[in-house]
Amino acid sequence: MFFVCFSFLTKQSQTTYTHTTQDHKLIKHYNPKYNIRRTISKFNYMSRPLYPIAGTTSPRLDDGSSPLIPLQRPFVYFGRSYSQIYVNNNGHLTFNGAFSSFTPQRFPMYGTRDIITVFWTDLDNRVNGEIYYNQYTSGSVLQQATQDINRYFPGLNFNANWVFVATWYEVAYYPTTGTRTTIQAVLISGGQYSFVLMNYGIIALTTHNVQAGYDSENSTHHFTIPGSFSNNATGIYSAFRLGSNVNVPGRWAFRIDLGSRVVIHITIPSITQCFTSKAPAPMFSLSNRARTSTVAALTLLGHDWSKCMSIMKQSSLSRDDLVRLRLAIRSLYLL
């Protein structure tokens, strides 16, 4: 018999802290001076490419993270709705738990974690730099987000109703105290749409590897910003800061609401399978280890896309062979 698996993928001011020369990576002793959390509002500017740097600060901990942050609006990440987020000190955002890794991995990771990596590398905010996060549900930040998304993704008639801004402001690399790097993640949602902007300010030079982009559970959706894991990732000629996919140097914009995650298991010698996807304007493709097939036309039913397809076993396969098929549903959108 055949086993078939369908995957539907449908600082103006700065506080000074004392610093020891001990190797904190090995000792990681507790010091109250490094465990500071306060609410601030320092900046009120929209200079490109950064959004306002303001809000609550994360603890000063090497390889630390913010506490769980309840979201004021649900945020959809490739078909999965989240009501909480973590801002991790080493340059990434996660949803189901804090993540302390300071060693970047190449995408796709094929892991169990949804992750947004603005600047995944070994950062250390204990001596200089702050990590801020803030949510907005009204005001000029929402207006700016609405304008930006409609400019980068025309035709959506988008209106932002929630923005989350996380900023790693003038943070140092470990163990090079005094280096200063500023990067930012901006999550934007409104209606059925979700986006992330990755903004890059001044990026200090380092020999550390850096991964920038995003990856989803099992890597059904992933993207690596050009320059990751290269000598051009940091310094004054950083590919992240000089490059862009939306014609704004230092800014990268991605739509990340698309796709659903449903798995159906079927035992067949041959099958006709129908399905629907709520992703707008999807593309369909089918492949397996034995051959690659093309799925034909789509049918629009209300707001859902529907497709029926037939799969036949190949004569070269016995009835006990295991054949794994993946049906990928991906919406058309601008990277």
Image (cartoon, rainbow, N blue to C red):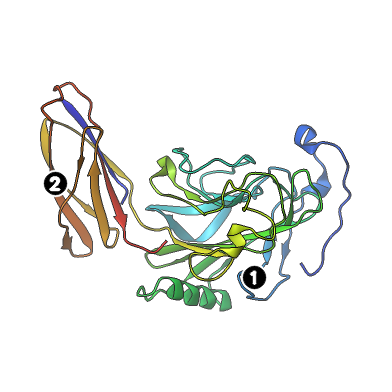
At 59% across and 50% down in the image, what residue appears?
Answer: 92
- Residue at the spot of label 1: 52
Disc 1 to disc 2, how far (Cα)?
A: 49 Å
At 79% across and 54% down in the image, what residue appears?
Answer: 128
296 relative position to 11: left or right: left
- Can residue 168 be seen here? no
- Can residue 16 be seen here? yes
At 86% across and 37% down in the image, what residue appears?
Answer: 22
Secondary element at image label 2: strand
Q: Quadrant of the N terminus?
A: top left
* Crowding at mark 1 (Cα within 10 Å: few <14, some 14-19, many 20+): some
Residue 295 image position (x, y, % from top left) = 18, 49
307 relative position to 334: left or right: left
Residue 33 image position (x, y, % from top left) = 83, 49
- Residue at the spot of label 2: 309
21 relative position to 235: left or right: right
